[in-house]
Image (cartoon, rainbow, N blue to C red):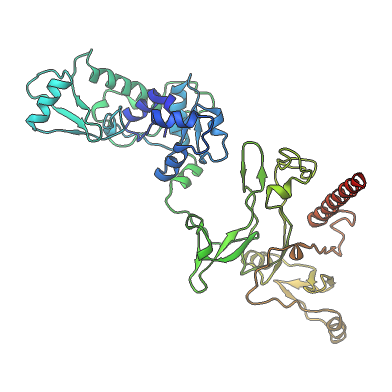
Amino acid sequence: LLDNTLNRFSRWLRILGIDAALETNEEEKQRTNSNTKKIVIFDKCRQEKRILVTTSHKLIQRNECPSGSYLVNPNDLERALTHMLLTHGTSLKPRNFLTICVFCNGCIKSVGNDPDLIKEAFESNKCPVIPGLVVYQCDTCSQFYWWSEEPNSSASRVKLQAAHLFKLAIQAGVPVEGDLHMFDFVDVEAERKVSVDYGDVSTGAAPSDALKWIQRRELRHPFSLESAYSALKPISLIQPETVVAVDEQTSLINEELLPFTNVTNDFVGTLDYIFYEPHHWQLKSRLHVPTSFREMNITAVNKGHLIPSASWPSDHLAIGAQIQTISPSPIAQHLQQQQPIRTTSTINAEKHTVKKQDSLTTQGVPKPLSNSQNATDQTNTTTPQFPANPTKVVFSPETQQHSRVDCACGCVPKNMLSLFEMAELRKQFREKQKAEKLAAAARVDG
Protein backbone atom coordinates (compact mmCIF):
# COMPACT_ATOMS: atom_id res chain seq x y z
CA LEU A 1 0.00 0.00 0.00
CA LEU A 2 1.68 3.18 -1.23
CA ASP A 3 1.05 6.72 -0.04
CA ASN A 4 -0.48 9.18 -2.50
CA THR A 5 2.88 10.71 -3.48
CA LEU A 6 4.02 7.41 -5.06
CA ASN A 7 1.52 7.29 -7.93
CA ARG A 8 4.22 6.62 -10.56
CA PHE A 9 5.88 3.99 -8.37
CA SER A 10 2.55 2.19 -7.97
CA ARG A 11 2.19 2.07 -11.78
CA TRP A 12 5.63 0.46 -12.09
CA LEU A 13 4.71 -2.26 -9.59
CA ARG A 14 1.40 -2.92 -11.35
CA ILE A 15 3.13 -3.14 -14.75
CA LEU A 16 5.30 -5.91 -13.25
CA GLY A 17 2.19 -7.77 -12.10
CA ILE A 18 2.52 -6.85 -8.41
CA ASP A 19 -0.59 -6.03 -6.37
CA ALA A 20 -0.01 -2.39 -5.36
CA ALA A 21 -2.81 -0.36 -3.77
CA LEU A 22 -2.57 3.43 -3.63
CA GLU A 23 -3.76 5.84 -0.95
CA THR A 24 -6.75 7.87 -2.16
CA ASN A 25 -6.87 11.68 -2.23
CA GLU A 26 -9.43 11.68 0.60
CA GLU A 27 -7.24 9.42 2.74
CA GLU A 28 -4.23 11.66 2.12
CA LYS A 29 -6.15 14.78 3.15
CA GLN A 30 -7.28 13.07 6.34
CA ARG A 31 -3.74 11.83 7.07
CA THR A 32 -2.13 15.25 6.57
CA ASN A 33 -4.73 16.99 8.74
CA SER A 34 -2.99 18.11 11.93
CA ASN A 35 -6.00 17.10 14.06
CA THR A 36 -6.11 13.55 12.73
CA LYS A 37 -5.32 10.86 15.29
CA LYS A 38 -6.36 7.81 13.28
CA ILE A 39 -4.44 6.99 10.10
CA VAL A 40 -6.65 5.10 7.63
CA ILE A 41 -3.81 3.53 5.65
CA PHE A 42 -2.41 1.99 8.86
CA ASP A 43 -5.69 0.15 9.40
CA LYS A 44 -5.89 -0.87 5.72
CA CYS A 45 -2.38 -2.34 5.88
CA ARG A 46 -3.33 -4.52 8.83
CA GLN A 47 -6.74 -5.52 7.48
CA GLU A 48 -5.53 -6.33 3.96
CA LYS A 49 -2.11 -7.63 5.12
CA ARG A 50 -0.18 -5.13 3.01
CA ILE A 51 3.24 -3.52 3.42
CA LEU A 52 3.19 0.28 3.74
CA VAL A 53 5.49 2.11 1.32
CA THR A 54 5.92 5.84 1.92
CA THR A 55 8.23 8.80 1.38
CA SER A 56 7.23 10.42 4.69
CA HIS A 57 9.74 10.24 7.55
CA LYS A 58 7.13 11.47 10.04
CA LEU A 59 4.63 8.81 8.98
CA ILE A 60 7.12 5.97 9.35
CA GLN A 61 8.07 7.18 12.85
CA ARG A 62 4.55 7.13 14.29
CA ASN A 63 4.05 4.57 17.07
CA GLU A 64 1.06 2.97 15.37
CA CYS A 65 2.86 2.55 12.03
CA PRO A 66 2.67 -1.14 10.95
CA SER A 67 5.82 -3.18 11.31
CA GLY A 68 7.77 -3.84 8.13
CA SER A 69 6.86 -0.48 6.58
CA TYR A 70 9.19 0.76 3.87
CA LEU A 71 10.63 4.28 3.47
CA VAL A 72 11.71 5.15 -0.08
CA ASN A 73 13.66 8.00 -1.61
CA PRO A 74 11.37 9.66 -4.20
CA ASN A 75 14.43 10.82 -6.15
CA ASP A 76 15.73 7.28 -6.71
CA LEU A 77 12.74 5.05 -7.32
CA GLU A 78 14.56 2.56 -9.54
CA ARG A 79 16.92 1.66 -6.73
CA ALA A 80 13.99 1.52 -4.31
CA LEU A 81 12.19 -0.90 -6.64
CA THR A 82 15.06 -3.36 -6.87
CA HIS A 83 15.78 -3.06 -3.15
CA MET A 84 12.16 -3.86 -2.26
CA LEU A 85 12.04 -6.86 -4.59
CA LEU A 86 15.26 -8.28 -3.12
CA THR A 87 14.41 -7.50 0.50
CA HIS A 88 11.07 -9.30 0.33
CA GLY A 89 12.36 -12.20 -1.74
CA THR A 90 9.99 -11.45 -4.64
CA SER A 91 10.25 -13.48 -7.84
CA LEU A 92 9.11 -11.85 -11.08
CA LYS A 93 6.83 -13.79 -13.43
CA PRO A 94 6.82 -12.23 -16.94
CA ARG A 95 3.53 -13.98 -17.76
CA ASN A 96 1.87 -11.73 -15.14
CA PHE A 97 3.28 -8.49 -16.59
CA LEU A 98 0.68 -6.03 -17.94
CA THR A 99 -2.22 -7.92 -16.34
CA ILE A 100 -3.03 -5.34 -13.61
CA CYS A 101 -4.78 -2.05 -14.28
CA VAL A 102 -2.36 0.85 -13.77
CA PHE A 103 -5.25 3.14 -12.81
CA CYS A 104 -6.99 1.19 -10.04
CA ASN A 105 -5.02 -2.03 -9.41
CA GLY A 106 -7.85 -4.15 -10.82
CA CYS A 107 -7.47 -7.20 -13.06
CA ILE A 108 -7.33 -6.79 -16.83
CA LYS A 109 -9.41 -9.33 -18.75
CA SER A 110 -10.36 -9.85 -22.37
CA VAL A 111 -13.90 -8.76 -23.32
CA GLY A 112 -14.02 -11.60 -25.87
CA ASN A 113 -16.41 -11.12 -28.77
CA ASP A 114 -18.92 -8.94 -26.96
CA PRO A 115 -19.92 -6.44 -29.69
CA ASP A 116 -21.38 -3.89 -27.27
CA LEU A 117 -18.19 -3.68 -25.21
CA ILE A 118 -16.04 -3.51 -28.32
CA LYS A 119 -18.22 -0.71 -29.71
CA GLU A 120 -18.02 1.16 -26.40
CA ALA A 121 -14.24 0.85 -26.45
CA PHE A 122 -14.09 2.25 -29.98
CA GLU A 123 -16.32 5.20 -29.11
CA SER A 124 -15.12 6.25 -25.67
CA ASN A 125 -11.40 5.45 -25.73
CA LYS A 126 -10.37 6.33 -29.28
CA CYS A 127 -9.56 2.69 -29.89
CA PRO A 128 -8.37 2.14 -33.48
CA VAL A 129 -10.88 0.29 -35.68
CA ILE A 130 -8.77 -2.69 -36.75
CA PRO A 131 -10.28 -6.02 -37.81
CA GLY A 132 -9.54 -8.75 -35.29
CA LEU A 133 -8.36 -6.30 -32.63
CA VAL A 134 -8.44 -7.88 -29.14
CA VAL A 135 -9.95 -5.55 -26.54
CA TYR A 136 -9.40 -5.84 -22.77
CA GLN A 137 -11.15 -4.22 -19.81
CA CYS A 138 -10.42 -3.73 -16.11
CA ASP A 139 -12.89 -5.65 -13.98
CA THR A 140 -12.89 -2.89 -11.36
CA CYS A 141 -12.84 0.53 -13.02
CA SER A 142 -13.96 -0.64 -16.54
CA GLN A 143 -10.94 1.03 -18.19
CA PHE A 144 -10.44 -0.36 -21.72
CA TYR A 145 -7.10 -1.63 -23.06
CA TRP A 146 -6.02 -3.00 -26.43
CA TRP A 147 -2.79 -4.18 -27.93
CA SER A 148 -0.96 -2.42 -30.75
CA GLU A 149 2.54 -2.86 -32.16
CA GLU A 150 2.64 0.72 -33.42
CA PRO A 151 5.79 2.39 -31.97
CA ASN A 152 3.91 5.46 -30.71
CA SER A 153 0.96 3.57 -29.23
CA SER A 154 0.38 3.55 -25.48
CA ALA A 155 0.62 -0.26 -25.48
CA SER A 156 4.12 -0.19 -27.00
CA ARG A 157 5.28 2.47 -24.55
CA VAL A 158 4.04 0.43 -21.58
CA LYS A 159 5.75 -2.68 -22.95
CA LEU A 160 9.07 -0.80 -23.26
CA GLN A 161 8.68 0.49 -19.69
CA ALA A 162 8.01 -3.04 -18.45
CA ALA A 163 11.08 -4.34 -20.31
CA HIS A 164 13.24 -1.60 -18.78
CA LEU A 165 12.08 -2.38 -15.22
CA PHE A 166 12.46 -6.11 -15.92
CA LYS A 167 16.10 -5.65 -16.97
CA LEU A 168 16.86 -3.53 -13.88
CA ALA A 169 15.45 -6.26 -11.65
CA ILE A 170 17.45 -8.99 -13.43
CA GLN A 171 20.67 -6.97 -13.12
CA ALA A 172 20.03 -6.57 -9.38
CA GLY A 173 19.62 -10.33 -8.97
CA VAL A 174 15.83 -10.60 -8.61
CA PRO A 175 14.75 -14.21 -9.37
CA VAL A 176 12.67 -14.91 -12.48
CA GLU A 177 10.05 -17.68 -12.60
CA GLY A 178 8.33 -19.32 -15.56
CA ASP A 179 8.65 -18.55 -19.27
CA LEU A 180 9.38 -15.05 -20.55
CA HIS A 181 6.10 -14.92 -22.53
CA MET A 182 6.01 -11.71 -24.62
CA PHE A 183 9.35 -10.59 -23.15
CA ASP A 184 11.38 -13.40 -24.72
CA PHE A 185 13.55 -10.76 -26.42
CA VAL A 186 15.21 -10.07 -23.03
CA ASP A 187 18.46 -12.04 -22.60
CA VAL A 188 18.31 -12.92 -18.89
CA GLU A 189 21.82 -14.41 -18.73
CA ALA A 190 23.38 -11.39 -20.44
CA GLU A 191 21.55 -8.98 -18.13
CA ARG A 192 22.80 -10.92 -15.09
CA LYS A 193 26.37 -10.12 -16.13
CA VAL A 194 25.74 -6.37 -16.33
CA SER A 195 27.56 -4.55 -13.51
CA VAL A 196 25.22 -2.10 -11.79
CA ASP A 197 25.91 -0.12 -8.61
CA TYR A 198 22.80 -0.27 -6.40
CA GLY A 199 24.50 0.88 -3.20
CA ASP A 200 23.38 -1.33 -0.33
CA VAL A 201 21.52 -3.76 -2.63
CA SER A 202 23.23 -7.15 -2.84
CA THR A 203 23.32 -7.59 -6.63
CA GLY A 204 23.21 -11.09 -8.00
CA ALA A 205 22.65 -12.64 -4.57
CA ALA A 206 20.08 -15.33 -3.96
CA PRO A 207 17.48 -14.76 -1.21
CA SER A 208 18.96 -15.35 2.24
CA ASP A 209 17.86 -18.17 4.53
CA ALA A 210 16.05 -15.61 6.69
CA LEU A 211 13.90 -14.53 3.73
CA LYS A 212 13.12 -18.15 2.91
CA TRP A 213 12.00 -18.71 6.53
CA ILE A 214 9.82 -15.59 6.44
CA GLN A 215 8.12 -16.77 3.26
CA ARG A 216 7.16 -20.10 4.83
CA ARG A 217 3.56 -20.31 5.99
CA GLU A 218 4.45 -22.17 9.19
CA LEU A 219 7.58 -22.03 11.30
CA ARG A 220 8.05 -24.75 13.90
CA HIS A 221 10.60 -25.66 16.55
CA PRO A 222 10.87 -28.63 18.91
CA PHE A 223 10.73 -26.59 22.12
CA SER A 224 7.76 -25.93 24.39
CA LEU A 225 8.64 -22.40 25.47
CA GLU A 226 6.95 -20.03 27.86
CA SER A 227 7.73 -16.42 28.64
CA ALA A 228 9.02 -15.67 32.13
CA TYR A 229 6.87 -12.53 32.10
CA SER A 230 3.51 -14.12 31.39
CA ALA A 231 0.51 -15.13 33.43
CA LEU A 232 -2.44 -17.46 32.92
CA LYS A 233 -5.75 -15.71 32.27
CA PRO A 234 -9.20 -16.92 31.21
CA ILE A 235 -9.65 -16.73 27.46
CA SER A 236 -12.77 -14.58 27.97
CA LEU A 237 -10.56 -11.74 29.27
CA ILE A 238 -8.17 -11.79 26.30
CA GLN A 239 -8.63 -9.77 23.13
CA PRO A 240 -9.22 -12.08 20.13
CA GLU A 241 -6.21 -10.81 18.18
CA THR A 242 -3.86 -11.60 21.09
CA VAL A 243 -4.80 -15.28 21.43
CA VAL A 244 -1.88 -17.57 20.59
CA ALA A 245 -2.37 -20.91 22.32
CA VAL A 246 -5.14 -22.05 24.62
CA ASP A 247 -5.11 -24.88 27.15
CA GLU A 248 -8.19 -26.89 26.10
CA GLN A 249 -8.60 -28.45 29.57
CA THR A 250 -8.53 -25.21 31.57
CA SER A 251 -9.49 -22.64 28.86
CA LEU A 252 -6.59 -20.52 30.10
CA ILE A 253 -4.02 -18.70 28.01
CA ASN A 254 -0.60 -17.25 28.72
CA GLU A 255 -0.68 -13.48 28.29
CA GLU A 256 2.47 -11.37 28.16
CA LEU A 257 2.56 -9.00 31.14
CA LEU A 258 5.04 -6.41 29.86
CA PRO A 259 3.44 -3.77 27.60
CA PHE A 260 6.89 -2.45 26.70
CA THR A 261 10.62 -2.83 27.33
CA ASN A 262 11.64 0.06 25.06
CA VAL A 263 10.18 3.57 25.33
CA THR A 264 11.49 6.31 23.05
CA ASN A 265 10.06 9.20 21.03
CA ASP A 266 9.74 6.97 17.97
CA PHE A 267 8.83 3.59 19.42
CA VAL A 268 6.99 1.99 22.33
CA GLY A 269 6.88 -1.79 22.47
CA THR A 270 8.23 -5.06 23.83
CA LEU A 271 11.54 -6.12 22.32
CA ASP A 272 13.00 -8.27 25.10
CA TYR A 273 11.87 -11.68 26.32
CA ILE A 274 13.10 -14.55 28.49
CA PHE A 275 11.85 -17.94 27.34
CA TYR A 276 12.21 -21.24 29.17
CA GLU A 277 10.75 -24.74 29.04
CA PRO A 278 8.41 -25.28 32.03
CA HIS A 279 8.92 -29.06 31.81
CA HIS A 280 12.63 -28.69 32.56
CA TRP A 281 12.78 -25.43 34.53
CA GLN A 282 10.81 -23.89 37.38
CA LEU A 283 10.40 -20.13 37.55
CA LYS A 284 11.40 -19.01 41.05
CA SER A 285 11.35 -15.20 40.76
CA ARG A 286 11.69 -12.41 38.28
CA LEU A 287 12.94 -8.86 38.19
CA HIS A 288 10.38 -6.12 38.72
CA VAL A 289 9.78 -4.13 35.56
CA PRO A 290 7.58 -0.99 35.34
CA THR A 291 4.40 -1.44 33.33
CA SER A 292 3.12 2.14 33.04
CA PHE A 293 4.45 5.53 31.96
CA ARG A 294 3.54 6.90 35.39
CA GLU A 295 5.84 4.35 37.04
CA MET A 296 8.58 5.19 34.51
CA ASN A 297 8.29 8.93 35.11
CA ILE A 298 9.65 9.08 38.65
CA THR A 299 10.65 12.75 38.37
CA ALA A 300 7.12 13.72 37.15
CA VAL A 301 8.47 15.96 34.38
CA ASN A 302 7.45 16.34 30.73
CA LYS A 303 8.52 13.23 28.76
CA GLY A 304 10.16 11.87 31.89
CA HIS A 305 9.03 8.36 30.94
CA LEU A 306 11.36 8.21 27.91
CA ILE A 307 14.52 6.15 28.25
CA PRO A 308 17.41 6.25 28.74
CA SER A 309 17.02 8.53 31.75
CA ALA A 310 18.61 9.12 35.14
CA SER A 311 16.35 6.45 36.64
CA TRP A 312 16.52 3.96 33.76
CA PRO A 313 20.02 4.27 32.28
CA SER A 314 19.44 2.22 29.12
CA ASP A 315 17.14 2.38 26.10
CA HIS A 316 15.93 -1.10 27.10
CA LEU A 317 14.43 -1.98 30.47
CA ALA A 318 16.36 -4.74 32.24
CA ILE A 319 14.45 -7.99 32.61
CA GLY A 320 15.64 -10.96 34.65
CA ALA A 321 14.42 -14.27 35.95
CA GLN A 322 15.69 -16.94 38.34
CA ILE A 323 14.91 -20.45 37.16
CA GLN A 324 15.71 -23.82 38.69
CA THR A 325 16.13 -27.14 36.96
CA ILE A 326 13.42 -29.73 37.48
CA SER A 327 15.04 -32.59 35.56
CA PRO A 328 18.20 -32.88 33.48
CA SER A 329 17.68 -31.48 29.99
CA PRO A 330 18.56 -33.63 26.95
CA ILE A 331 21.57 -31.39 26.27
CA ALA A 332 22.89 -31.82 29.81
CA GLN A 333 22.45 -35.57 29.61
CA HIS A 334 24.29 -35.65 26.31
CA LEU A 335 27.21 -33.65 27.72
CA GLN A 336 27.42 -35.95 30.73
CA GLN A 337 27.68 -38.94 28.44
CA GLN A 338 30.42 -37.37 26.36
CA GLN A 339 32.97 -36.65 29.11
CA PRO A 340 33.48 -37.43 32.83
CA ILE A 341 32.73 -34.77 35.43
CA ARG A 342 35.17 -34.63 38.34
CA THR A 343 32.96 -32.75 40.77
CA THR A 344 29.26 -32.40 41.29
CA SER A 345 27.44 -29.63 43.12
CA THR A 346 24.21 -30.23 44.94
CA ILE A 347 22.03 -27.16 45.38
CA ASN A 348 19.70 -27.08 48.32
CA ALA A 349 16.49 -25.79 46.76
CA GLU A 350 15.17 -24.44 50.04
CA LYS A 351 18.24 -22.83 51.60
CA HIS A 352 20.20 -22.09 48.39
CA THR A 353 23.41 -23.62 49.71
CA VAL A 354 26.04 -25.32 47.63
CA LYS A 355 27.95 -28.42 48.71
CA LYS A 356 30.86 -29.84 46.71
CA GLN A 357 31.21 -33.60 46.59
CA ASP A 358 34.72 -35.06 46.36
CA SER A 359 33.69 -38.04 44.35
CA LEU A 360 34.68 -38.90 40.82
CA THR A 361 31.71 -39.05 38.46
CA THR A 362 31.99 -41.05 35.28
CA GLN A 363 29.30 -41.11 32.57
CA GLY A 364 27.08 -39.02 34.85
CA VAL A 365 27.04 -41.70 37.66
CA PRO A 366 28.85 -40.87 40.95
CA LYS A 367 31.51 -43.31 42.14
CA PRO A 368 30.24 -45.32 45.15
CA LEU A 369 31.49 -43.99 48.49
CA SER A 370 32.70 -45.99 51.47
CA ASN A 371 30.28 -46.65 54.31
CA SER A 372 31.88 -44.03 56.54
CA GLN A 373 31.88 -41.40 53.80
CA ASN A 374 28.34 -42.23 52.88
CA ALA A 375 27.11 -41.96 56.44
CA THR A 376 28.85 -38.61 56.92
CA ASP A 377 27.56 -37.05 53.68
CA GLN A 378 24.00 -38.22 54.20
CA THR A 379 23.78 -36.12 57.34
CA ASN A 380 24.91 -32.96 55.52
CA THR A 381 23.27 -33.25 52.09
CA THR A 382 19.64 -32.58 51.32
CA THR A 383 18.27 -33.76 48.00
CA PRO A 384 16.25 -30.95 46.39
CA GLN A 385 12.58 -31.72 45.97
CA PHE A 386 10.95 -30.28 42.83
CA PRO A 387 7.24 -30.31 42.09
CA ALA A 388 6.15 -32.48 39.17
CA ASN A 389 4.01 -29.65 37.83
CA PRO A 390 5.55 -26.26 38.68
CA THR A 391 3.04 -23.59 39.63
CA LYS A 392 3.07 -20.22 37.94
CA VAL A 393 4.69 -17.44 39.93
CA VAL A 394 2.26 -14.60 40.62
CA PHE A 395 3.37 -11.27 39.17
CA SER A 396 3.66 -9.21 42.33
CA PRO A 397 6.39 -7.34 44.21
CA GLU A 398 6.59 -10.19 46.77
CA THR A 399 7.79 -12.60 44.09
CA GLN A 400 10.32 -10.16 42.64
CA GLN A 401 12.73 -10.53 45.56
CA HIS A 402 16.22 -11.77 44.73
CA SER A 403 18.15 -14.53 46.44
CA ARG A 404 21.81 -14.88 45.63
CA VAL A 405 23.75 -18.13 45.51
CA ASP A 406 27.52 -17.69 45.86
CA CYS A 407 29.49 -20.37 44.07
CA ALA A 408 31.78 -22.32 46.42
CA CYS A 409 34.51 -22.63 43.80
CA GLY A 410 34.96 -18.86 43.66
CA CYS A 411 34.22 -18.46 39.93
CA VAL A 412 31.95 -15.50 40.75
CA PRO A 413 33.69 -12.65 42.66
CA LYS A 414 32.12 -11.91 46.03
CA ASN A 415 31.90 -8.19 45.28
CA MET A 416 30.04 -8.64 41.96
CA LEU A 417 26.38 -7.70 42.27
CA SER A 418 23.73 -9.76 40.54
CA LEU A 419 21.10 -8.25 38.26
CA PHE A 420 18.55 -8.56 41.05
CA GLU A 421 20.83 -6.88 43.61
CA MET A 422 21.51 -3.95 41.28
CA ALA A 423 17.80 -3.56 40.65
CA GLU A 424 17.16 -3.55 44.39
CA LEU A 425 19.78 -0.82 44.91
CA ARG A 426 18.19 1.29 42.16
CA LYS A 427 14.78 0.78 43.75
CA GLN A 428 16.06 1.89 47.16
CA PHE A 429 17.68 4.94 45.56
CA ARG A 430 14.42 5.92 43.83
CA GLU A 431 12.45 5.49 47.06
CA LYS A 432 15.02 7.61 48.90
CA GLN A 433 14.73 10.36 46.28
CA LYS A 434 10.95 10.27 46.50
CA ALA A 435 11.03 10.46 50.30
CA GLU A 436 13.44 13.41 50.20
CA LYS A 437 11.18 15.30 47.78
CA LEU A 438 8.15 14.68 49.94
CA ALA A 439 10.04 15.82 53.00
CA ALA A 440 11.20 18.99 51.20
CA ALA A 441 7.65 19.70 50.03
CA ALA A 442 6.36 19.26 53.59
CA ARG A 443 8.93 21.74 54.93
CA VAL A 444 7.91 24.30 52.32
CA ASP A 445 4.23 23.86 53.16
CA GLY A 446 5.04 24.16 56.86
**Which residue is nearer to you in this view: 103 or 199?**
103
**Which residue is nearer to you in this view: 44 or 313?**
44
Residue 187 point in image, percent of width and height: 32, 24
User: Does residue 132 sit above or below 362 in this rendering?
Assistant: above
**Which residue is nearer to you in this view: 359 or 391?**
391
User: Does residue 40 sit above or below 197 in this rendering?
Assistant: below
**Which residue occupies the extreme front position in the image?**
446
Which quadrant would the N terminus be assigned to in this image?
Answer: top left
Residue 337 point in image, percent of width and height: 66, 68
Classify residue 405 as left or right of residue 125: right
**Which residue is nearer to you in this view: 241 or 27?**
27
Residue 98 picture quarter: top left
Residue 52 point in image, percent of width and height: 46, 35
Q: Residue at x 49, y 43 (%)?
A: 209
**Which residue occupies the extreme top position in the image?**
152
Q: Residue at x 69, y 47 (%)?
A: 293
Q: Residue at x 67, y 77 (%)?
A: 387
Classify residue 437 as left or right of residue 339: right
Residue 18 point in image, percent of width and height: 35, 34
Is residue 204 among what the camera can see? no
Residue 165 picture quarter: top left
Residue 60 picture quarter: top right
Classify residue 180 as left or right of residue 306: left
Classify residue 231 as left or right of residue 126: right
Is residue 339 among what the camera can see? yes
